[in-house]
Image: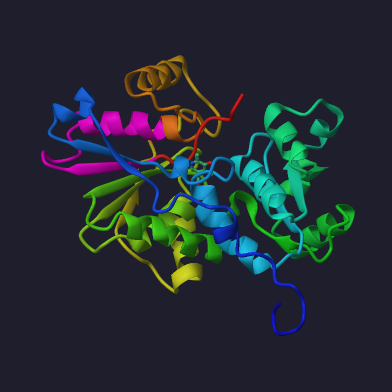
Amino acid sequence: MSDNGRVSSPDPTTALHPRLPSPLQEIEDDRFARHGVRLLLKRDDLIHPRLIGNKWRKLVPNLSAAAGRSLLTFGGAYSNHLRATAAAGRLLGLSTVGVVRGQELADRPLNPSLARCAADGMRLHFVDRSTYRHKTDPATLATVLRAADAEGAYVVPEGGSNALAVRGCRELGAELRDRADVVAVACGTGGTLAGLAAGLAPDQRALGIPVLKGGFLGEEIRRLQESAFGGRRGHWDLDDRFHFGGYARTTPDLDAFADDFEDRHGLPVERLYVAKLLYGLVCLTEEGAFPRGTTLTAVITGSPLPA
Ligand SMILES: *Cc1c(COP(=O)(O)O)cnc(C)c1O
């Protein structure tokens, strides 16, 4: 019981038995070894079977802050963040509302990602693209909350990146202190990189591989660090060359690379983010971006949608 007499909601960290710190694995891969680079995988995909990877680190502080209120958040039709939020809701007995980009999706059968959200009890509310684009505008947000019958809900932004989430990801960096020279991660909103960089030691560097086209992410990461920590933290930079045309875009070359990586290492490669990260790291290594003797860690932020 909390001091105001209400039953306090369970601390999600203990209730869900996460595997933390997540495992750190060295793998043998000649494409790195011949350049004198050691490759480690930081297996955040193993933190929890349903609340996977960086979504765990970003959501848990928000679940605590929601304190039992229903959770409303935003995502596209294939959003890993929506799936993680829905799973968290089911596991913790919180009601969740997913605001989905694309009014037209309301009239179609749900794709496997949204079907999983619905199966976990998430109420889906579809909005047109213009409304979705303006969702951070207070008047638009109020209209969406009313239309979704979710006034009073705890609102988590698209991709889950707010100050609490960024502070949650600082722990990822802290787990890797003195374990690597460079820590690389795929970026959507940049919240994970913002927190990771803040948690590393001063002689370590974080490298972000954006999966979206645009080139605006650096500014966004500075803004996220400002809101979470009051200023810029750690050493980080971005390499914008590996988005393959944008979010969820792929090429036969990238698909073949990911299939081959799975065969070589027995690692199921998540395709929206992790495949682009690993591809980028092989290219950078071949270009000589990492001096011989570098220990490079790739954060495995997620795993493929289970069949
Ligand atoms: C959401 C997600 C990311 C992106 O995280 P950001 O904090 O938005 O940059 C990276 N990898 C996977 C597998 C994800 O699901």
Magenta residue span: 276-299
Would you identify the image quadrant in which residue 128 lies?
top right
Residue at (20, 30) in percent of width and height: 32
Q: How many marks?
A: 0
Q: Nearer the viewer, residue 236 or 81?
A: 81
**Residue furthest toward the bottom?**
3
Question: Which one is in front, 167 or 223?
Answer: 167
**x, y percentage for residue 236?**
32, 54
From the viewer's perspective, is 66 left or right of 202? Answer: right
Q: Is residue 265 visible?
A: yes
Colour pattern of the rendering = rainbow
Q: Position of residue 148 (x, y in %)?
A: 86, 52
Q: Is residue 263 left or right of residue 59?
A: left
**Image quadrant where residue 117 sits:** top right
Q: What residue do we see at 41% from left, 15% from top?
A: 256
Residue 161: in sight, yes or no? no
Q: Position of residue 223 (x, y in %)?
A: 49, 63
Q: Quadrant of the C terminus?
A: top right
Quick check: is 128 in the magenta stretch?
no
Q: Nearer the viewer, residue 156 or 226?
A: 156
Q: Is residue 67 left or right of residue 276?
A: right
Q: Residue at x 73, y 47 (%)?
A: 132
Instruction: Look at the picture and state if 264 lies above or below 152.
Output: above
Q: Nearer the viewer, residue 186 or 95?
A: 95
Give x and y (percent) for residue 120.
73, 41
Q: Is residue 256 above or below residue 231?
A: above
Quadrant where the N terminus lies?
bottom right
